[in-house]
Image: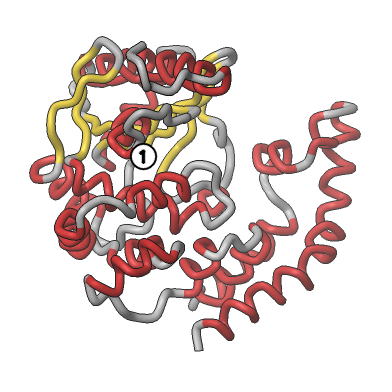
Amino acid sequence: MSEGTPALTQPDLERAARALRIDALAAKVVAALAEAGIDSILLKGSTHDFLYPGAVRGYVDVDLLVHPGHRHAAGGVLRAMGYRNLLEGAAENERPPYADTWVRDGAPAVDLHFELPLAGAPPDDVWRVLRDECSEPFVVGSGAARALTRDARLLVVALHAAKSGPHSTAGLPDLVRAASVPLGNWGTAAGIAGRVGAIDGFTAGLRMTAQTSEIADRLALTGETPLALALSSSGASSPARSVGRLLTTESIRDRVRLVLRALVPTRTSIRLTSPIANRFGAAGLALAYAARPFKVAWRMPSAVRQVRATLDRRH
């Protein structure tokens, strides 16, 4: 280590060791997907190291984007590697609409994205723009992969911050560091956001800090943030986001489904959200289901207050 270079702390060393392990896994997954004829793009992870010169960025999983038509085939590749879908058996409205999380005991998780979060353009078009026009070769671990160009990575930084909210331990630090990137790069990122239908999410992300809000002003990014996005970017609770989803769902049938699913979630979902459901066998599961309506009712007043506060800020 050269004179004047700050020594790495123990947390830095731990983050670096974890990053090396995750990058090695990413290389294996990318290679396995390629062998199956599936193209992938590395999201986040070491691709955001350019925001941390002289420092160590921490991350905990592998994020890959694949064509939406390859979602299930890519999942099959991960299953062959010993992974399982964390939300296997969950209802569609209990799953993130953009990614599946695959887990394996003793290994980092893999978030398999088949859509770009907060992008409103058709998924096929999003993939075409990102894969064909906004990606480049990238070395991860000891393997070859593809990553987004640096300007497109800025789009991911802003969208991740907007989706994760102000209390995120990953999204917001990346955004704060990205504030020093030249305005021209942010302008290019804004152009990509417009092409993939993500300008609302991009703007909401930039508005989360004073420094990046200034970037949004200089790029003349304006407009009203949709309720669901306003709730996530403000750090609203999961029940509040559910209320927001209910308010913005037009179909009465879909609203009824949302309410019923909130009161009676699938076994997969309730086991992930209620510790007692995983204890005492069938009795614990039954108790978790019996307590669910009371749990929903207990959280509802706070959720409604958060939604009202968000609506007030939008007017």
Name the residue located 17 percent from the left edge and 61 percent from the top edge. 187
In the displayed structure image, the side of residue 163 where residue 301 appears, left or right: right
Name the residue located 50 percent from the left edge and 52 percent from the top edge. 164
| For residue 271, above or below residue 187 | above
Name the residue located 26 percent from the left edge and 10 percent from the top edge. 142
* Residue 103 position within the rendered picture, expressed as x and y whole percent measured from the top left: 53, 24
Q: Amino acid at mark 1?
A: His
* Residue 213 position within the rendered picture, expressed as x and y whole percent measured from the top left: 37, 68
Name the residue located 38 percent from the left edge and 15 percent from the top edge. 25
Q: Which residue is mark 1?
A: 113
Of residue 57 and residue 145, the one placed in the foreground of this image is 57
On the image, which quarter does residue 144 sit in?
top left
* Residue 307 position within the rendered picture, expressed as x and y whole percent measured from the top left: 63, 75
* Residue with the most extreme bottom position: 315
Colour theme: secondary structure
In the displayed structure image, the side of residue 88 where residue 291 appears, left or right: right
